[in-house]
Amino acid sequence: MIVLEWLFLTIAACDAAEPWQLGFQDAATPMMQGIIDLHHDIFFFLILILVFVLRILVRALWHFHYQKNPIPQRIVHGTTIEILRTIFPSIIPMFIAIPSFALLYSMDEVVVDPAITIKAIGHQWYRTYEYSDYNSSDEQSLTFDSYTIPEDDLELGQSRLLEVDNRVVVPAKTHLRIIVTSADVPHSWAVPSSGVKCDAVPGRLNQISISVQREGVYYGQCSEICGTNHAFTSIVVEAVPRKDYGSRVSNQLIPQTGEA
Amino acid sequence: MFFLESLDMQQYSLKEKAEKSDVATKVADAEEVENSASTSSKEVVTEEVETPAPLVESTEVPPAVAEENTEANPVAENSVEDAQVAAEESNERTKESSGDAEEPPEIKLETAPADFRFPTTNQTRHCFTRYIEYHRCVAAKGEDASECDKFAKYYRALCPGEWVRIFFQEL
């Protein structure tokens, strides 16, 4: 039964955390793909080193057991082995650093001009999103608040402490600029499957540029302790096809302009 | 919050002069400049010339959306005109029809381009500079110069609404 439940959950939300999850969520952006690939590349060598070190350790324990070998050889010096075990471990981090830095700097780089800008403003304890590309004045803008749905109001299939009332709708396969900032205390805007974790600092605008490669719903949580309801400040990004995005936004713009 | 931002504003207003001349030397490669109207207008012109990126984006991106829009509302004429004008038109239309209009306003996927002056994650100055540029443009070319709409679009895309309101109070 429990297994079935797990299976069901696994099927229900592929881009959210699942029970007993050990690995990554599926990548939705090239950035996340790069992070996962780097992790796997490094882990391969990490396992090799681990096995090698464990072998030496177990071998030493085995062969120098006090019953088996009560009087061991008393070697106190070995120049060759000392040089080797100093040089090799210092070369390995250098080889890890090369792809790591390449990825790090490519994540920062804005290669093409973004097609839309979304502002994610952290509040205690909700998020405000602004779509201001379609404004003709300072006053009107497509702005909405995104609150986590309380546990009692959840519907079947919705994830506890992950689902929000208003999702951020973004077009898929489009370069997005997300401006992250905060209105009160530091927050952090993080969506694991997009490979994004950006601190929201009051008085400062942080930019992240992502391009979501497939349509879907992506879940994230606040990642900077921001007060009592820190755990109840979730993020949901919904990637829709580009043509649907246009209609979604224009439909939301109508009530805005109607009010104005 | 207001305390923090007003603090920011003070810093900005102190640095404003330095910022202006800094930008001017970068863009126009000029000699010693003081912030006269002539230099700022010249700067604005060079700025226009050097950023072809948003135009490319706008020609390349909208077809899908534009087509979609022609299907949705046959009334809207989809000539490639400024998004500002289009948005204003649709705004007026919805006002006239008051409330539940069937014609959605046109959505054009374009925004402020990446700026080589602000290549880092921190975009705070980007927002502020675009806001200043807009007002310098308006000061040089008059209140209803269409060249300035571009800068207005940029700063609206980059600055949070709350910030814009505070900027406006400081004007």
Image: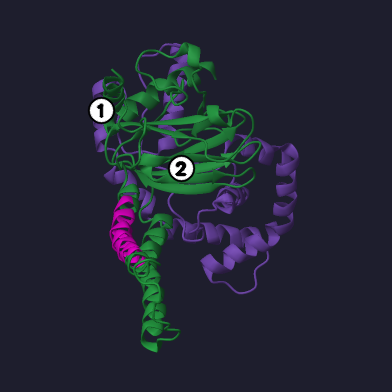
Chain colours: A green, B purple
Chain for numbered disc 2: A
**In the picture, residue B40 is in which quadrant?**
bottom right
Whether residue A58 is visible, yes or no, is: yes
Q: Which residues are magenta?
A: A36-58
Q: Is residue B28 magenta?
A: no
Task: Name the residue at 67% across, 41% down.
Answer: B167
Residue B7 percent location from the top left of the image: 75, 47
The residue to which callout 2 is attached is A178
Between B54 and A214, the residue placed more toward the observer is: A214
Residue B118 percent location from the top left of the image: 51, 58
Between A203 and A18, the residue placed more toward the observer is: A18
Q: Residue furthest bottom?
A: A79
Does A126 appear above or below B9?
A: above
Whether residue B74 is visible, yes or no, is: no
Name the kind of residue labelled 1 in the image.
Glu
**How many numbered discs, if any?**
2
Task: Name the residue at 46% across, 29% down.
Answer: B88
Q: Is residue A38 magenta?
A: yes
Residue A21 percent location from the top left of the image: 35, 36
Between B17 and A191, the residue placed more toward the observer is: A191
How far is disc 1 from disc 2 in space, using C-alphas?
A: 25 Å
Q: On the rendered structure, is A228 left or right of A59?
A: right
